[in-house]
Image: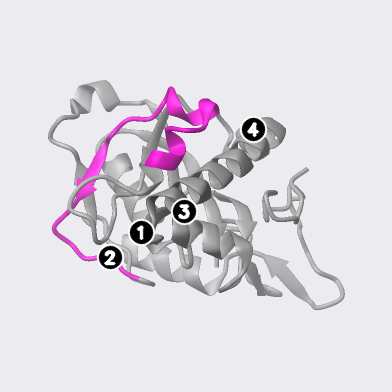
Amino acid sequence: PFGDRPGRSCWKASAAMSDSTRGARRCLVCGAATHAGFAVCFCCATLVRQLNSPLAPVVVVADYRLGDSMHRRLRGYKDAPVTELRHRHLTELAAILDEWLAANRSGMHRRFGAPWDLVATVPSTHRPLGAPADALVSRVAALAGCRADLLVRGPEDTGHLKAARRGFVLSPAVDPGWLLDRHVLVVDDSIVTGARAQSAVAALRMAGARVVGVMAVGRL
């Protein structure tokens, strides 16, 4: 089963995942805490309404807090002012992800209901092309061989708790016929509400792909 420590998934494999001491439950989509009597958390319920479609199941490698070591790695591999520091953070994150996948890949397949044969990252909000997570995925053997540049930013805006079916669109370089019925894992380096990751899921589904789930390296 998935565990709770940093570098381990915050998703519990148990279907019920109730917290008898606090009267809380875990969201059936993302595994975040939700109130007793609710199957999904507020964020996921909001995204379902915005996208008007089911969400993909989410697994999270590690929850983090602002300023902790995981947060510093996730910020630093993209934004550290010194190349050597960015490289160090990237190497540390890749090692964490590689170890976690080695221990939990079969559990992910059970959670998602199927293995994946393609890996897509969520395009950057700020950078004109690509995704910061591309560098991370390319360093993890279990993901690198399946990675494909599938999405680009679309005409609709996405944000903190704002999902959009056209927030991302299929890259012009991708043949829709080739993508049809492929099993895709969406990877994002960090999520808060999941709005951008689930917008990417919606875009891939509209293009004909079968998205098995979302993997986030960190969740705030």
Q: Secondary structure at mark 2?
A: loop
Q: Residue furthest right?
A: 21
| Residue type, numbered disc 2 | Thr
Q: Which mark is residue 168?
A: none
**Residue ID at (38%, 50%):** 83
Question: Along the polypeptide, which appears first: circle 4 or circle 2?
Answer: 4
**In front: label 3 or label 2:** 3
**In front: label 3 or label 1:** 3
**Residue ID at (79%, 77%):** 23
Above or below, 142 against 171 in this view is above
| Residue type, numbered disc 3 | Leu
Magenta region = 135-159
Circles 1 and 2: CB distance less than 8 Å? Answer: yes
Query: Nearest the camera: 87 or 176?
Result: 87
Q: Which mark is residue 196?
A: 1
Is the stretch drawn in magenta largely helix, strand or loop? loop
